[in-house]
Image (cartoon, coloured by chain):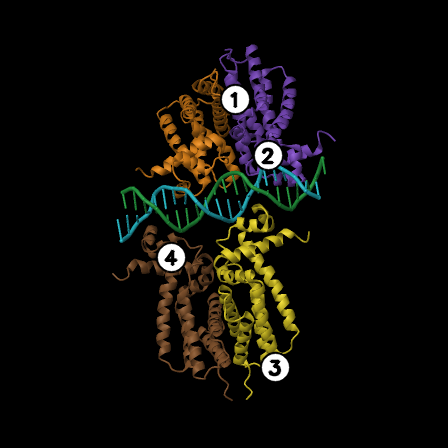
Chain colours: A brown, B yellow, C purple, D orange, E green, F cyan
DNA sequence: GATGAATGAGCTTTCATTCAT
DNA sequence: GATGAATGAAAGCTCATTCAT
């Protein structure tokens, strides 16, 4: 048995339930039912309800980081890298909609009830962007007066907010891939060195 | 006594408590204590806990919209208008930090427990951006291939996420005004018509 | 102003509200609204919610007793007297339906939450029946082996339960006057001296 | 453990508490304490407080109906059957005093807060009387002009009210069995065919 | 006397967590 | 390891009663 079959079954069930009801309104018994285990069993794998949420952050974002980094590392051009990041982020949201909802929602909540929890995985994820920008600046492709610390957040925020609203009303006039392209286009236009 | 002193006292207390604990963890008695009224008094002015949250959205965002629109209407140049929007949004967050936290957090939560509630005020607010972009496109200042519906969300998301993280770690290397400038610079660079 | 206009207005409003909702579910504010006075005004005339109920018993039953006694005293024949009692009881219930509902319901409830309250008015009322029977026994019209203490309760119970169900489903196959006749017929048949 | 020990323990505790305090004044915690379970446990077996009351009606009256019918079915003579009904009703009240109090009280209350609840069990119970009378009329033992629908209610009301007052003041001058005899004597005298 | 806004005690119900089996 | 019945703390909300105006 891998890291335990049940551990994963519970995580996957929790993602669905949290996405549907939100963390606070989700009941342990909902998760247990969806995971087809007894309520008590959950406490053999997690300390408490919060612990499930944190585990979702840690483990699932971890997998995404690895995948995104792998794709980006195959590129040399920072412009392409930024495009890939945008596209992959959006695709992930499309493919793993429930997970995306949990991350988006609870990311904002979490710091309220888990003051102590520093979301290092999330930081690691958006730092991919600042590294790309940094690299572009070194290569004199991106403007030097762009602050990578601001730009990474702006980029992530732009993608995430667009995705959030796309999720809420899926009857949209644009596909999520189009949105990704638009956003990377705007950002690249804004940060590229003007060599004229 | 103005049109209900108490109504406003409760709203202001709720903003503080929601900001500190989050909506779900906030107790009515916390709000009552902070507003210096009895628990029951709250129910003379609001139907229930959710109603307080919704009132915060409606009333407080309403005031901000009016103010931002007033400032923007004094300008003619869409570029300046976008700069003003970015700066005012950030200043509002700086000045009304607690309110900003509530809006940011619960904006993401709300659709989970208030499915029926359509946040028209919020839509009205970000539509300010799409109107600016539309205007700039008409005046051939902004690129025609930028989709206003995507750009408004991207712009808002960029500002909001940057602000969110600035709030969380106020020991930042940049001021919030600098962040506002960076973001409007990037966006303007990305959407301006290239007349070369 | 008589025993106070307001006192009576509140009593009449309370009868309606108690009849509709029952004592516990009735709110003071309901009564105040129906009586067109302020909530606080009620406490100028009554000590508390229970006190209103007790006052209904005392005052309203008091009036009925006086009336029933007056009618009965015009008769000499105990058989007729019993018939009058049955008919008047039923007519009262028909005419003062709300009052009847309150008396019936709360009579059974009251001893639970007002242990100390001895419902002397009610006792006085049903003692009318035992006095009639006693009189009939003295006149050798009614059987001597009938216990007046049992018969009075049986008679009252028979009338009251029949009336209660008649109120609940007014689409009955008999009028309340027919029911009164049936019951006095049965009782008279059962207690009359057999002179054969 | 039989088909849920706890379900029955809670019912029995609730009968005692409702009898003592009345439905509205009874607190869930009172019932829980008397049943020696936690407050929350009650909600594993019942949906809410009303549901406990309804269950008492359904289950406990159900048992009584079965027993009374069994005894009556052993008789042929409608006169005897009526006597048995009266006696058994009174004995039940004596033996299960708390249950009797709950049934009597809440029977009158219930229609106020549970409009939707049709007390079919109770109807079934008093219909035993109308069936007896009907049978007696067919056999030309009882008078044809007696309306079974009125007589059943009158009979039940007479028994129930006499029992109610007997419960309230147990220092009575008659036993409950004597009362039963008196009442069946009066009724039989009143409804028997006069063959003289 | 009259008002009705304000009070705060009190109670039903929920649900994360435990633990005997 | 797995179960799920049982626990009991916790909190939203109601409403009888008070009292400043």
Query: Would you say F1 lies left or right of B142 here?
Result: left
Residue of label 3: B139
Label 4 in the same subunit as label 2: no
Residue of label 1: C153
Q: CA distance from mark 1 to mark 4?
A: 67 Å
Q: Judge whether B30 appears above or below B92 on screen.
A: above
Q: Position of residue C190 (x, y in %)?
A: 50, 18
Foreground disc of the pair 2, 1: 2
Q: CA distance from mark 2 to mark 1?
A: 29 Å
Question: Badge 2 local density, few (<14 within 10 Å), some, or many (20+)?
Answer: some
Residue of label 2: C49
Q: Secondary structure at mark 3?
A: loop
Residue of label 4: A51
Return the chain for callout 2: C
Q: Position of residue B111 (x, y in %)?
A: 49, 60
Label 2 in the same subunit as label 1: yes
Q: Judge whether B29 appears above or below C63 on screen.
A: below
């Amino acid at each position: 048995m891998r890291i335990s079959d049940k551990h994963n079954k519970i995580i996957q069930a929790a993602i669905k339930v949290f996405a549907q009801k939100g963390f606070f309104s989700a009941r342990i018994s909902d998760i247990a039912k969806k995971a087809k285990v007894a309520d008590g069993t959950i406490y053999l794998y997690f300390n408490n309800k919060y612990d499930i949420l944190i585990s979702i952050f840690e483990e699932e974002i971890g997998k995404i980081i690895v995948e995104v980094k792998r794709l980006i590392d195959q590129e040399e051009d920072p412009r392409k890298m930024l495009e890939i990041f945008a596209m992959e982020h959006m695709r992930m949201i499309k493919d793993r909609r429930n997970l995306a909802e949990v991350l988006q929602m609870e990311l904002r909540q979490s710091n309220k009830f888990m003051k102590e929890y520093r979301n290092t995985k999330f930081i690691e994820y958006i730092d991919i962007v600042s590294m790309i920008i940094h690299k572009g600046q070194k290569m004199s492709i991106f403007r030097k007066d762009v602050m990578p610390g601001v730009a990474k957040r702006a980029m992530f925020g732009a993608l995430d907010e667009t995705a959030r609203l796309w999720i809420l009303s899926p009857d949209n006039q644009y596909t999520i891939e189009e949105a990704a392209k638009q956003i990377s286009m705007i950002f690249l236009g804004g940060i590229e060195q003007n060599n004229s």
